[in-house]
Structure formats: structure tokens, C-alpha cells
Image (spheres, rainbow, N blue to C red):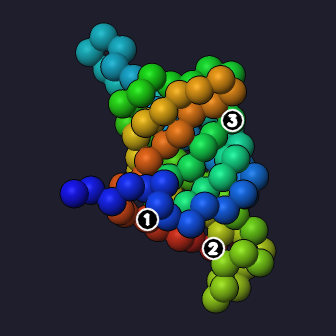
Amino acid sequence: MAEDSRSKKRFQVVAPAVVEIEKPSGTEVETEFLNLLSRDVSAGGAFFYTDSPLPEGTRVKVDLVLMTDQLKKIESDQAMIKLVGEVVRVESGGMAVRFNKRCHILPL
């Protein structure tokens, strides 16, 4: 049975994020970038504020910037977390993205 990502501890973190979407355009792929804010974040996913949520099932790449006072052992003021995920829920004002298990944390 798959673990429910909602069972992971969630943090009320409003953090800037860049969400990348690849859209087929004829014979090429067009990349679109959305600058959004998170509402809450967990190891399994996050909710992002947007007036134009993506359809459920849309695969996305997410660069989430957190202040490092929330993350121990990083010797920079900010850290970027690079994630890949999928839109799993759409509601008024935003969308929920479930992350896969790969995660990269980079100091900025």
C-alpha cells in the first residue's frame, strides 16, 4: 500500500518557487515557468497559490527557495530545493503537487 503523503509532517511555509512545465507545441516542446508561492510544504508535496492551476496529472519540476534558518547545516542564507512532482489536486486559489523521492538541496 502506498504511503499517504498527507501523513507526513506539514510546515506552514510561504516560500517562493519556480514551477517548470513542458508543453508539447507541434513537433517541439515548449517550456513555461510559473513564479508561485507555497502555502505549506512537507517531504511528500506542497500547495502552491495560483489563479490558473494546472490540470491534475501535469508533471512539473519545482525549485523551492527556503530560508536556511529552517534548515540546519547549510552555511548560506538561502537554499534551493529542486524537486519533481505531479499535480494531484486543484482547488480554488491553487494546486497541490506530490513530489517524487528525488530531492536536491543546493545552497544559494
Q: Which residue is mark 1?
A: 103
Residue 108 image offset from top left, x and y in percent: 67, 69
Distance between the alpha carbons at the discs numbered 3 and 2 = 25 Å
Label 3: state its secondary structure.
strand
Q: Quarter-wise, where is residue 93 in the image?
A: top right
Distance between the alpha carbons at the discs numbered 3 and 1 = 21 Å
- Kindly tell me whether residue 43 is visible in this rendering: no
Residue lying farthest to the left in this orientation:
1
Amino acid type, residue under disc 1 in the picture:
Cys
Against 36, residue 104 (above or below) is below
Dot 1, how many residues are within 10 Å of its Cα: few (below 14), some (14-19), or many (20+)?
few
Residue 10 image offset from top left, x and y in percent: 60, 61
Residue 75 image offset from top left, x and y in percent: 70, 85
Front one among 90 and 82: 90
Amino acid type, residue under disc 3 in the picture:
Tyr
Label 2: state its secondary structure.
strand
Q: Quarter-wise, where is residue 58 in the image?
A: top left
Q: Which residue is mark 3?
A: 49
Against 32, residue 37 (above or below) is below
- Kindly tell me whether residue 103 is visible in this rendering: yes
Label 1: state its secondary structure.
strand
> Which mark, by number, is residue 107?
2
Residue at x 62% of width, y 20% of height: 52
Mark toward the viewer: 2 or 1: 1
Residue at x 41% of width, y 27% of height: 56
Amino acid type, residue under disc 2 in the picture:
Pro
Residue 62 image offset from top left, x and y in percent: 52, 48
